Amino acid sequence: MSMYLDAIDGALRQRLIANPFINSLVSTRVYPNYLASITNPVYPLICFSRIPTQRDYRYNKRITCQYTIWIYSSKGFSQTDPIFEMMKTSLDNEFFDLPNSLGRVGFRLTEFPSQDVDPDQQLYYATFNVVAIAYFK
């Protein structure tokens, strides 16, 4: 099952990097882990983490899992908000091919972002959830 989940992770990252607007701001700084694990981060950046309570429906070749996504900026919400809007355009209700012809995956944003500020690091961030539904061949 790990191969399938890794493929979904990779598809999420690649879809975000492929968007020209998101790429112009974050380049390839889209990480499948938490901010604390990134050495010398450059902002803005995007982190995502698969929530470990995924449901496995492999008997009919479908896996559903959920992600938490964080958009971090040192310049304020004026930078995180447009990235979120473009993520909605790039991901929401669309299906994409998975690597190695494994199948297809669709993403659905499940909520609008919550916004918070870390005053110690002078860091702004938006947090939201995404559900991925993958169909495998």
Image: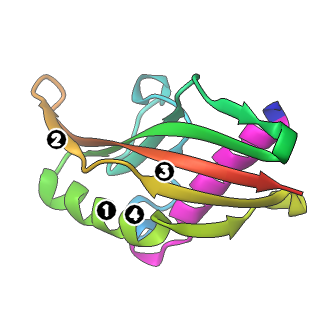
- Of residues 81 and 102, the one nearer the viewer is 102
**Hey, what amino acid is under mark 1?**
Ile
Question: Which mark is nearer the camera, 3 or 1?
Answer: 1
- Relative to 112, 49 lies left or right: right
Residue corresponding to mark 1: 83
**Hey, what amino acid is under mark 3?**
Arg
Question: Which mark is nearer the camera, 4 or 1?
Answer: 4
Helix, strand or loop under label 2: strand
- Picture quarter containing residue 11? bottom right
**Hey, what amino acid is under mark 2?**
Gln
Q: Is residue 47 above or below residue 102?
A: above
Residue corresponding to mark 2: 115
First of labels 2, 3 by sequence position: 3
Q: Position of residue 71 (x, y in %)?
A: 33, 47
Was residue 36 drawn as part of the magenta stretch in this picture? no
Question: Which mark is nearer the camera, 4 or 3?
Answer: 4
Q: Which mark is residue 87?
A: 4
- Relative to 98, 21 lies left or right: left
**Hey, what amino acid is under mark 4?**
Met
Was residue 4 drawn as part of the magenta stretch in this picture? yes
Dot 3 and dot 1 residues touching (CB under 8 Å)? no
Where does the magenta region start and end?
3-21
Q: Is residue 109 above or below residue 5?
A: below
- Picture quarter containing residue 1? top right
Q: Residue at x 46, y 70 (%)?
A: 90
Q: Crowdedness of circle 1 by 10 Å Cα count: few (<14), some, many (20+)?
A: many
Helix, strand or loop under label 3: loop
Q: Residue at x 33, y 43 (%)?
A: 128
